[in-house]
């Protein structure tokens, strides 16, 4: 009886290559086993980035050392424009320049005045308690007869006011006219009281370039008129002024507000002052 012997599998050689699946069933089973393998968890955080390859450096011209200088590449560099000011940006503050002192020419010496200006005038000008402006010159005052002339004029106007009030009261039979007359009389009497002090505070000074006139004690005022600006010099005197021998000299300039009136001058002193001012004004206008 012949028995068919079962074929024995060939001996596997450990050094030989693995046997690849050949049937569809074996391929399907192999792919399913690959899908069932567990995937290792990835750590939390950003995924690792793959660095991109750097671009190769292209040789070119180097920057110039100063604006407008040619570059090292062989061609001149473009001019650098000035940056335009941007809105909202405050430019840095620059240090202010030191103020320069104005340069003036040498001052002219005081004018030689004739002696008739000080004949019959007050001896010393009345100064305020506090020292005023320091001026380089000599003060000339007005005549003493000016006070007498003003007192006579004020008394005359005081008499006129009282006589007019009396006439109105007699004509109407009402004493109301003495009310305004009394107010006016108080002002006249007050002016008579302070008149000597005001007269002693009046004075003028002939400097090298201008004439200075001052008046007042409580409200002191000084006016300087350049010789070259004088256009007219006028001398006036009323009936009582001629009786007492006093005059008023007025200097008129281009600006009406700068005119100066010097009252209480003697007649000879006013004429001498007029001639002196005209002579000096002519030389200042011509620049001699």
Image: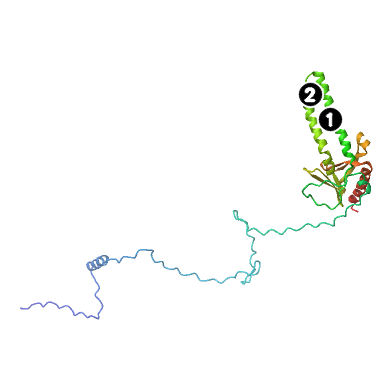
Q: Crowdedness of circle 2 by 10 Å Cα count: few (<14), some, many (20+)?
A: some
Dot label at residue 158: 1
Q: Residue at x 84, y 43 (%)?
A: 200
Q: Quick one: 56 or 205, which is closer to the camera?
A: 205
Q: Quick one: 81 or 36, which is closer to the camera?
A: 81
Q: Is residue 252 left or right of residue 62?
A: right
Colour basis: rainbow
At mark 2, the secondary structure is: helix
Q: Is residue 24 left or right of residue 208?
A: left
Q: Quadrant of residue 26?
A: bottom left
As drawn, the residue found furthest toward the left would be: 1
Q: Quick one: 263 or 74, which is closer to the camera?
A: 263
Evaluate whether residue 160 shows in this view.
yes
Q: In the displayed structure, would residue 189 be above or below residue 65? A: above
Q: Position of residue 12 (x, y in %)?
A: 20, 79
Dot label at residue 177: 2
Number of marks in picture: 2
Q: Quadrant of residue 220?
A: top right
Q: Position of residue 86 (x, y in %)?
A: 60, 55
At mark 1, the secondary structure is: helix
Evaluate whether residue 238 shows in this view.
no
Q: Quadrant of residue 80?
A: bottom right
């Amino acid at each position: 009886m012949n028995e068919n012997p079962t074929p024995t599998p060939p001996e596997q050689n450990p050094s030989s290559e693995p046997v690849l699946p050949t049937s569809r069933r074996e391929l399907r089973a192999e792919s399913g086993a690959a899908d069932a393998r567990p995937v290792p968890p990835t750590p939390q955080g950003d995924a690792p980035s793959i660095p991109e390859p750097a671009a190769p450096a292209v040789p070119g011209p180097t920057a110039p050392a100063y604006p407008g200088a040619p570059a090292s590449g062989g061609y001149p560099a473009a001019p650098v424009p000035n940056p335009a000011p941007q809105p909202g940006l405050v430019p840095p503050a620059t240090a202010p320049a030191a103020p320069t002192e104005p340069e003036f020419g040498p001052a002219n010496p005081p004018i030689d005045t004739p002696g008739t200006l000080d004949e019959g005038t007050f001896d010393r000008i009345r100064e305020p308690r506090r020292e005023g402006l320091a001026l380089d010159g000599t003060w000339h005052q007005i005549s003493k007869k000016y006070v007498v002339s003003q007192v006579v004029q004020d008394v005359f106007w005081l008499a006129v006011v009282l006589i007019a009030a009396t006439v109105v009261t007699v004509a109407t039979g009402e004493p109301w006219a003495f009310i305004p007359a009394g107010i006016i009389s108080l002002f006249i009497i007050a002016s008579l009281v302070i008149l000597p002090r005001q007269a002693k505070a009046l004075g003028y000074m002939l400097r090298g370039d201008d004439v200075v006139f001052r008046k007042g004690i409580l409200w002191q005022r000084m006016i300087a008129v350049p010789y070259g600006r004088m256009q007219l010099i006028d001398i006036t005197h009323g009936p009582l002024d001629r009786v007492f021998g006093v005059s008023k000299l007025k200097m008129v300039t281009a600006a009406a507000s700068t005119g100066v009136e010097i009252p209480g001058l003697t007649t000879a002193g006013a004429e001498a002052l007029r001639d002196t001012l005209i002579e000096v004004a002519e030389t200042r206008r011509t620049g001699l």
